[in-house]
Amino acid sequence: MTEITKCINEWNATIEALGQGKQTILIRKYGTTLNEFLLYPTISYANNEDVLDSFQEDYKGFVKDNLLPIGENRTYEVKYYATVEEVIDKSSSRIGAFNKFHIWTRDHVKDYLGRKEAKIWILRVYELDEPQMLKRSNGMLYANVNNPVKLEGKPVISDDEFDKLKEEILNTK
């Protein structure tokens, strides 16, 4: 059984979208060297007055409900882990074609990417059998949590549904 300490820092609302099957991708400016990692919730973005402007209209209620993770004193509940199934490169000018696969606005993604090419990470997300209260180290791309976590859990979407989504994402022009 695999245990890991590596995590990626992400907005809690995005983690919950991944964990509830509303999103299957992360859009990054960089690729990944890890095949699997914990999804560690961050909160600093939640203090921005205009935070809801970063999310598509249909998801604003969801985001409000999932803005903050459970936790305190820099210790937060980690409920999910992900495996990277594939990373594809797309021009930043073509990124709007992927809007239905994530909860952010097109403007938010464009602002984030600038003129850089998008690296679209197709993730298979799993809910941990036992959520953990964890602290993390500092890290630019990845961090480490303070205790190893067993990667035991079930996929948040079925194999068939994931395969269909992956195929659709790979065929998006």
Image: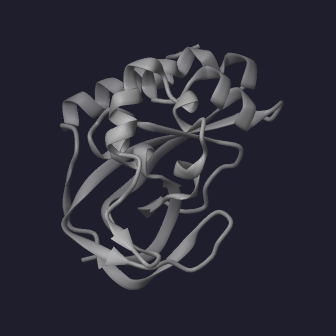
In front of the other: 63 or 109: 63
Q: Is residue 159 above or below residue 127?
A: above
Asked where in the image residue 151 lies, by quadrant, the reply is bottom left
Residue 141's spot in the image, x, y percent?
64, 63
Q: Position of residue 43 (x, y in %)?
A: 50, 58
Quadrant where the C terminus sits is top right
Query: Residue placed at 41% from the left, 28% from the top?
Result: 60
Image spot of residue 65 (x, y percent): 31, 41
Return the residue found at the far bottom.
147
Say which residue appears at 56% left-offset and 51% top-offset: 47
The colour scheme applied to this rendered structure is one colour
**Which quadrant holds the N terminus?**
bottom left
- In the rendered view, tell whether residue 134 sits above or below residue 57: below
Horizontal arrangement in the rendering, residue 139 relative to residue 134 (left or right): right
Picture coordinates of residue 81, whole percent (x, y) = 35, 59
Count numbered badges in the picture: 0
Q: Nearer the viewer, residue 41 or 35?
A: 41
Residue 73 in the image: above or below residue 171: below
Camera-nearest residue between 132 and 88: 132
Please name the residue shown 45% across and 29% down the image.
103
Residue 94 located left or right of residue 75: right
